[in-house]
Image (cartoon, rainbow, N blue to C red):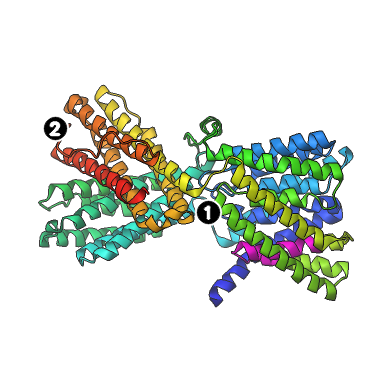
């Protein structure tokens, strides 16, 4: 416990120092009306200091902060502009910058937009405000560089650490299998799955960035494939304990030792040596079990190639733009429908904020923009999350007012209030629970206003606006395009099945000579990200009682995707004449029917067909590939059973 507190205190020091430098620099140069940018950037620093692509992120953030200041000025011209801008700006910010896999990264931009409206300026003051924002962003960027230099962090370091951890989990799995500790195997498989999900998130984060680096996140994608195959290879061995002969165990021990050496070499960035160890061992296959031979050779070859590729990329710098469908144009099109949670959330937020901001402007309410600011913070994409945050906000605000009233009684001096504001911002960065964070946010806000002699009715206004915002947030979440975790859970499960469906389509295209390797890669990455969303929605909804079956569905789907992607890779490397097009079409058609049945069940529609059969003609002239096909169909059967028996009311 003491160690955790110590770490939080140490983590809070850099953003607090940044706040002090930025806030007071702008305060003395430009005045109090522009110093508020210091609060935003000190909060944003927490995200930027661990951002793999901080250069691109900061450039984007700087542009958005500048545009927000311009829009906030336009919104202050008259009440009509205020209403229009406070509808359009939140909608655009949420629609463009809300990340479906990280639904909080738009918050600093929304805060900046509202903060600028709290202290309106004339046209003559706009260049000064824009200059203050630009200067603050430059200072923040320099602090991030200094912080990373002190911490000795490099671009791509996080994903490299994940890859090394994945190699370690591979050896743990082998050790557990050798000792027949199947509970430990399952635990290690889940760890490796989570590592893959984290790596997918980092690669996804690279999708809209130009990376200036020797070894970028994209280069680590093959590790995801390797870890997938290791998970399912070990899983197959555990399901059929007869394969664990004495010869097999001896061979797995050798494999474990080689992977352990490779992991330690990779940890020291000796990638060429690690790859060489794997290549040497891959030529020593002496075990008389065809499935194990195929899997081990595939894993070792793929892994050694991936490690060697990383080694080559580290030798020189390169510019690489990753072309995934996560680019801005695709996001614009894919979410432009009323069923998209992003569209619904953007509309809900704009409809809730617009009239409140207009009324605050029209009646010139003192500190009135506290209310739209609180609404922007409280309304979340899903109803249950909003309710929890509203509760924390009200409790935290009340406690914060009481705490500040006590401090104000003993320290009414403006200088003392500035000190209280600095300490409050320090404690903001030490807390994890939102209610405690709100306590210190309230103290910081009140102390800064008291320091500027804005004392009249301060406490009552703060609490009244918070209660009003809480009521509006609850009503908006419940009445305006409502979404909940249970519904989104099923939507995300259907999305996984849609990707399965599409993966089968591109497999079918192989018999016609068409290949789409890049699409396959994107599907694998996205399936991990969607699976993370599924688990989050499960935890936040009533389906939490079925979380074991939700996890089983995710793992089965991952095995299905892995096997089909593996089959696709093997078949695409050979002549298409080796494929039996008719048999492949029959298999794919049957599997697609099973997928449609699962999607119908999740949509509460009538189910026409049941699970897939398991007796297919050979679709390829290779016993290993055909065996993988049958196991893929078996995965779908278990997924179907999981949904029908355990996940439907």
Q: Position of residue 49 (x, y in %)?
A: 60, 55
Of badges 1 and 2, nearer the viewer stands 2
Camera-nearest residue between 474 and 43: 474
Indicate the quadrant where residue 530 lies. Answer: top left
Q: Are marks 1 and 2 in contact (CB under 8 Å)?
A: no
Q: Residue at x 14, y 37 (%)?
A: 615
The answer to if 429 sits in the magenta stretch is yes
647 with respect to 92 (left or right) = left
Horizontal arrangement in the rendering, residue 206 relative to residue 358 (left or right): left
Gap in angstroms between the C-alphas marked 1 and 2: 52 Å
Left or right relative to 269: residue 483: right
- Which comes before the other along the chain, label 1 or label 2? 1
Residue 436 visible (yes or no): yes
Residue 384 point in image, percent of width and height: 55, 53
Callout 1 crowding tier (Cα within 10 Å): few <14, some 14–19, many ≥20 = few
Q: Is residue 633 above or below residue 617?
A: below
Q: Is residue 334 left or right of residue 139?
A: left
Residue 304 visible to the viewer: no
Q: Is residue 630 magenta?
A: no
Main secondary structure along the magenta-highlighted residues: helix
**Relative image position of residue 319 (x, y in whole percent):** 51, 37
Magenta-tinted stretch:
425-447
Tell me the residue that label 2 is attached to: 617
Nearest the eye: 608 or 243: 608
Q: Circle 1 is placed at which residue position?
A: 154
Residue at 80% across, 49% down = 118
Q: Secondary structure at mark 2?
A: loop
Q: Nearer the viewer, residue 306 or 484?
A: 484
Position of residue 591 measured from the top left corner of the image (x, y, whole percent): 26, 35
| Residue 578 - label | none
């Amino acid at each position: 416990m003491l160690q955790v507190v110590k770490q939080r205190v140490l983590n809070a020091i850099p953003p607090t120092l940044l706040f002090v430098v930025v806030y007071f620099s702008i305060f003395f140069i430009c005045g109090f009306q522009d110093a508020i940018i210091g609060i935003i950037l000190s909060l944003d620093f927490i995200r930027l200091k661990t951002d793999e692509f901080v250069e691109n992120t900061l450039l984007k953030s700087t542009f958005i902060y500048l545009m927000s200041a311009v829009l906030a000025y336009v919104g202050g011209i008259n009440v009509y502009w205020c209403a229009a801008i406070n509808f359009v700006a939140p909608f655009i910010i949420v629609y463009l910058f809300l990340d479906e896999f990280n639904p909080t990264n738009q918050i600093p931009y929304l805060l900046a937009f509202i903060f600028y409206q709290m202290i309106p300026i004339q046209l003559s003051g706009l260049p000064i405000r824009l200059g203050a924002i630009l200067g603050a962003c430059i200072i923040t960027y320099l602090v991030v560089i200094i912080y990373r230099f002190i911490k000795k962090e490099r671009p791509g370091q996080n994903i490299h650490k994940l890859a090394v951890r994945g190699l370690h989990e591979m050896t743990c799995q082998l050790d557990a299998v050798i000792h027949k500790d199947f509970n430990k195997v399952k635990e290690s498989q889940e760890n490796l799955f989570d590592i893959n999900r984290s790596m997918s998130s980092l690669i996804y984060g690279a999708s809209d960035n130009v990376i200036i680096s020797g070894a970028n996140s994209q280069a680590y994608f093959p590790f995801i494939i390797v870890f997938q195959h290791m998970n399912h290879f070990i899983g197959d061995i555990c399901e059929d304990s007869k394969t664990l002969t004495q010869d097999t165990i001896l061979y797995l021990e050798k494999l474990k030792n080689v992977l352990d050496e490779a992991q330690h070499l990779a940890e020291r960035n000796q990638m060429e040596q690690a790859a060489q160890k794997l290549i040497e061992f891959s030529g020593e296959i002496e075990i008389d079990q065809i499935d194990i031979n195929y899997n081990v050779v595939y894993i070792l070859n793929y892994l050694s190639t991936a490690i060697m590729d990383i080694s080559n990329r580290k030798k020189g710098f390169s510019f690489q733009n990753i072309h995934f469908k996560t680019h801005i144009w695709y996001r614009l099109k894919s979410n432009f429908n009323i069923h998209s949670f992003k569209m619904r959330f953007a509309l809900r937020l704009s409809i809730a904020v617009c009239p409140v901001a207009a009324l605050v402007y029209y009646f010139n309410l003192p500190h009135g923009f506290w209310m739209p600011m609180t609404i922007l913070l409280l309304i979340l994409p899903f109803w249950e999350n909003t309710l929890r945050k509203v509760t924390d906000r009200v409790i935290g605000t009340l406690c914060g007012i009481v705490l500040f009233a006590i401090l104000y009684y003993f320290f009414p001096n403006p200088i003392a209030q500035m000190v209280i504001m600095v300490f409050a911002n320090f404690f903001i960065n030490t807390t994890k629970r939102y209610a405690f964070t709100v306590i210190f946010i309230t103290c910081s806000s009140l102390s800064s206003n008291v320091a500027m002699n804005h004392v009249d009715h301060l406490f009552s206004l703060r609490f009244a606006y918070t209660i009003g915002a809480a009521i509006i947030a609850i009503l908006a979440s419940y009445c305006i395009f409502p979404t909940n975790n249970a519904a989104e859970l099923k939507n995300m499960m259907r999305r996984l099945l849609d990707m399965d469906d599409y993966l089968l389509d591109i497999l079918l295209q192989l018999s016609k000579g068409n290949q789409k390797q890049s699409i396959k890669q994107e599907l694998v990455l996205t399936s991990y990200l969607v699976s993370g969303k599924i688990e989050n929605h499960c935890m936040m909804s009533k389906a939490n009682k079925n979380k074991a079956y939700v996890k089983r569905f995710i793992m089965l789907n991952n095995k299905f995707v892995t096997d089909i992607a593996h089959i696709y890779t093997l078949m695409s490397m050979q002549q298409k004449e080796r494929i039996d097009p008719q048999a492949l079409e029959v298999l794919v058609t049957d599997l697609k029917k099973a997928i449609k049945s699962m999607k119908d069940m999740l949509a509460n529609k009538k189910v026409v067909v049941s699970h897939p059969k398991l007796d297919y003609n050979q679709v390829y002239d290779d016993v290993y590939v055909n065996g993988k096909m049958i196991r893929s169909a078996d995965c779908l059967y278990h997924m179907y059973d999981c949904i029908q028996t355990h996940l439907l009311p």
